[in-house]
Image (tube, helix red, strand yellow):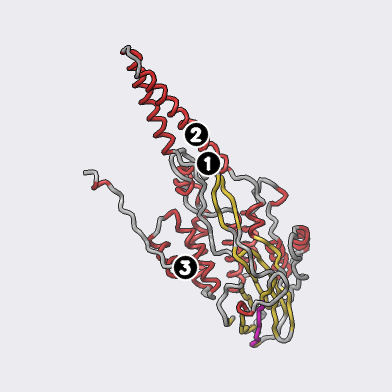
Amino acid sequence: MLSGCVTQTTVVRLTGNIMVDGPRMITNGPPRDRVLWQYRTAAAAMDRGQFSYARQLLDDALLTTGGISSDKGAKLARSYFHPESAKTFIGEPYERVMAYYYRGILYWMDGEPDNARACFRSAQIQDADAENHQYAADYVVLDYLDGLVTAKLGGDGSDAFKRADEETHLAKPPPPDPKANVLFFVEVGPGPYKYASGEYREELHFGVPSSPVHSARIEVDGRTLDAPLTDDLYFQATTRGGRVMDHVLANKAVFKTATDVAGNVGIIGGVIAASQRDRTSQEVGIGLIAAGVISKIVSATTTPAADIRAWDNLPRYLGFASVSLPAGPHAAKVEFFDQYGNPLPNLTKTITLNVPSDGKDTVVFVGDNSSTPQTV
């Protein structure tokens, strides 16, 4: 009878190839992880130039993210007896920002800069509720692109450009050129990862591997373009201050400790009382032992561990460059450099551009992990 009540769980064997594992996990993995695998697979598809597939994945992920307020898992995660990872994954703000950022790039590729701007603005909104307001909505590239689209559409993008300039922590973005018709979205380095610490792993922290790449340069038609890296996702992940969930997890940890201590006290006190010769003391002792055991069980089932699921194939740095080119085919080379300015030839990308004559912008997405050669 008991075996008939056991829930059947599908085990998905991972291969280490995201383009194999991602679709499998999206289809057969835990529903709470679906958005996580859509994020990961979309980023991998972007690197491989599979933009149509990335578009599909991001549209579905963002649709889920937008309706997450009714997620039952989020309520369970706030209870004492369910881990934070029980909730449907939508990501920390920097992860949600990147989902909108990538979707904006794809809109621009499709000749819809107005929708791209809407995505860049939505991305800033995801970053707007930082506990420390000094760092709220401070992505340089997002405000810069907001201003660039506005200027391209005949509006005044000066306010957005001003915000981008004031938010600069790394390199300044290039001078805006609304007439530029070839746009390079550049990303480099491994992005942040998450880990937990504390007695019960209730404290969420972020780390980042060292990046071998510190700058990028583009050569096209005999011209050299710098692609300044304006934003650092590790900086964004670590400058937001506390989360509401951090307080929930801290309370869970206190509760777990208190019930554990109460259980110890009850059991020890019960054993001492039960060892007495009079019947009343023995009965009290048995009661205390029972209460202590129950308290220990409650403590054992309390789960304060922080959720360390992460969009683990994001970049660390974001950059941008643009140039005006005549209609027709062009050859571009993107080079990456280490912290000392030495080229990393194994990372060089070659791209064939076909600039249309209808005035539509040519959008190039390239990073140190991108496939090469590419045709745009």
The quadrant where residue 313 appears: bottom right
Task: Please identify, in this view, whether the residue under mark 2 or under mark 3 is nearer the observer.
Answer: 2
Q: Residue furthest left?
A: 1
Proximity of marks 1 and 3: CB atoms separated by less than 8 Å: no
Q: Which residue is mark 2?
A: 257
Q: Which residue is mark 3?
A: 18
Quadrant of image for the N terminus: top left
**Mark 3: which secondary structure?**
helix
Local crowd at mark 2 within 10 Å, few (<14), some, or many (≥20)? Answer: some
Q: Is residue 368 left or right of residue 339?
A: left
Asked if residue 189 lies left or right of residue 265, the reply is right
> Residue at horizontal 76%, vertical 70%?
174
User: Mark 2 or mark 1: which comes first in sequence?
Assistant: 1
Q: Is residue 144 visible?
A: yes
Do callouts 2 and 3 mark residues in contact (Cβ within 8 Å)?
Answer: no
- The picture places residue 369, in percent across and down from the top left corner, at 57, 72
Q: Amino acid at mark 1?
A: Glu
Expressed as whole percent of the image width and height from the top left, the position of residue 365 reads: 61, 73
For residue 162: magenta? no
Q: Secondary structure at mark 2?
A: helix
Q: Are marks 2 and 1 in contact (CB under 8 Å)?
A: yes
Report the number of numbered marks.
Answer: 3
What's under tag 3, amino acid-wise?
A: Ile
Query: Quick check: can you spot residue 153?
Result: no
Query: Cα distance, mark 2 to mark 1?
Result: 10 Å
- Closer to the camera, 94 or 66? 94
Q: Earlier in the sequence, mark 1 or mark 3?
A: 3
Residue 281 sits above or below residue 264 on the image? above
- The residue to which callout 1 is attached is 199
Q: Residue 131: x, y in percent?
A: 66, 45
Magenta residues span: 329-335
Q: Nearer the viewer, residue 110 or 153?
A: 110
